[in-house]
Amino acid sequence: MKKLWNKYSYAIILISLSCVSALLLSLNMDSSNNDKFLKVTVSEGDSLWKIADQYTEDNSLSKEQFVSWVKKHNEMSGDQIFPGQKLVVPVKEEVFSSGELASAAGE
């Protein structure tokens, strides 16, 4: 075992550091997205417009833009949602680029 370590110690250390770095970066990226998006579970009687009423205060989108954004990023073709369905909704203003707002408004 000592022979193997002496021969490949640099490679083992490099691979180990790469794995640890990748893990730390993925955890960091995941936590930054949690600040910008929220996963909402649809309740009985909910609609996209009711959800928009709840969350448009936290960002600069109009209700129409919010609904368009939710439909686009949840790959929805219509306005119909179902109890128990999980939707990703924006909660921070920084997630919107001008191009994204323009494309969401045109839908």
Image: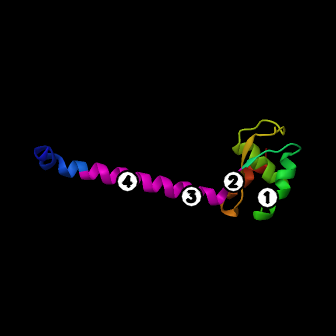
Residue on which the image places disc 3: 31
Which amino acid does the dot numbered 4 rest on?
Val
Q: Residue at x 27, y 52 (%)?
A: 14
What is the secondary structure assignment of the residue under circle 3?
A: helix
Label 3 to label 1: alpha-carbon separation = 20 Å
Q: Earlier in the sequence, mark 2 or mark 3?
A: 3
Label 2 to label 4: alpha-carbon separation = 27 Å
What is the secondary structure assignment of the residue under circle 4?
A: helix
Q: Earlier in the sequence, mark 2 or mark 4?
A: 4
Residue on which the image places disc 4: 20
Position of residue 31 in the picture relative to residue 61 (left or right): left
Please name whichever residue, 7 or 73, is drawn nearer the observer in this view of the structure. 7
Residue on which the image places disc 1: 55
Residue 8 image point, x, y percent: 17, 46
Q: Which mark is residue 38?
A: 2
Above/below status of 60 relative to 49: below
Q: Earlier in the sequence, mark 3 or mark 1?
A: 3
For the N terminus, give its image quadrant: top left
Whether residue 62 appears in this view of the structure is: no
Asked whether the beta carbons under mark 2 and mark 3 sit within 8 Å of each other, the answer is: no
User: Residue 97: which quarter of the image?
Assistant: bottom right
Residue 78 image point, x, y percent: 82, 36
